[in-house]
Amino acid sequence: MGKYEAAFSRLGEEALAKLEGPGGFLAVTEAHLVLVDDTGVKRLELARIRRVGKGEAGTLLVQGEGDSLVLPLKAFPLEELKAFLEGLKPHVARARKATSAPAPVPKAPLTQETAPPPPPEPPKAPVWEEEPPAKRDSVELAPEPESPPPAPVPQAKGRRNPLALPLKILSLLTLAYTLAFVALNPGADPWVLAGVLLGGLGLALTEWSLATSSQ
């Protein structure tokens, strides 16, 4: 047991976690983080700890509500000190849960034999800190009214040609007359028959086309 741990044991408190280095001794009790070094004994209440970060010139700063604890880096092995501070989180959470005080009151300066050091500058790179609660949007936008569907455009209906049926009948009559003339005059001049046949067929097709295209 080193001299710093021996000094802590004389306090009569139980250490839940501890770390001793060449320049000091750190211990976590039920309610406090305790530092023992050549300047004396310093305490910081676990439930008030909010963040751990870098301090001035080779120090780490454990910040609480109104208090802080300065840890010299040369007093402890660096990797073991980082692991110790990371393991501090569950102890802080346990202490806060066990604390039933409605509101914290300002504490007296750290208990120590010498004058407390001047307040350090705000840490730049914290080891860990609490995250602020996420903000909730309190205003909900009303849904935009849906636009009515466009009215269907009535389609124009085609107009029927009143002459369609008479033209079809006339086309059939023209075709029948042409075929009858050719059949009844087999001895006529072939050129005359050919002219009548072509003329009659052409006229019948024209009349039928006019009847169907006008509907």
Image: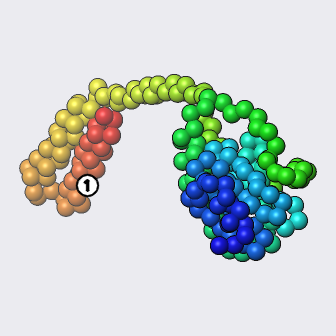
Specify the quadrant of the image occupied by residue 25.
bottom right
Left or right of 134 in this view: 36? right
- Say which quadrant the C terminus sits in: top left
Q: Is residue 186 among the parts visible in the rendering?
A: yes
**Residue at x 18%, y 45% (from the top left corner):** 175
> In which quarter of the view is residue 168 placed?
top left
Q: Quadrant of the N terminus?
A: bottom right
- Residue nearest the observer in this picture, 25 or 80: 25
Residue drawn at (24%, 48%), measured in percent from left and top?
200
Q: Position of residue 99 (x, y in %)?
A: 57, 38
Residue 129 vs 56, above or below: the answer is above
Colouring scheme, one of rainbow, by chain, secondary structure, one colour: rainbow
Asked if one can make out residue 86 in the rendered structure from this viewpoint, the answer is no
Amino acid type shown at disc 1: Leu
Residue 160 location (% of width, % of height): 30, 28
Of 106 and 112, nearer the camera is 112
**Image position of 16 (left or right of 70):** left
Residue density around tag 1, few if under 14, some if 14–19, many if 20 or more, within 10 Å: few
Label 1 sits on residue: 198
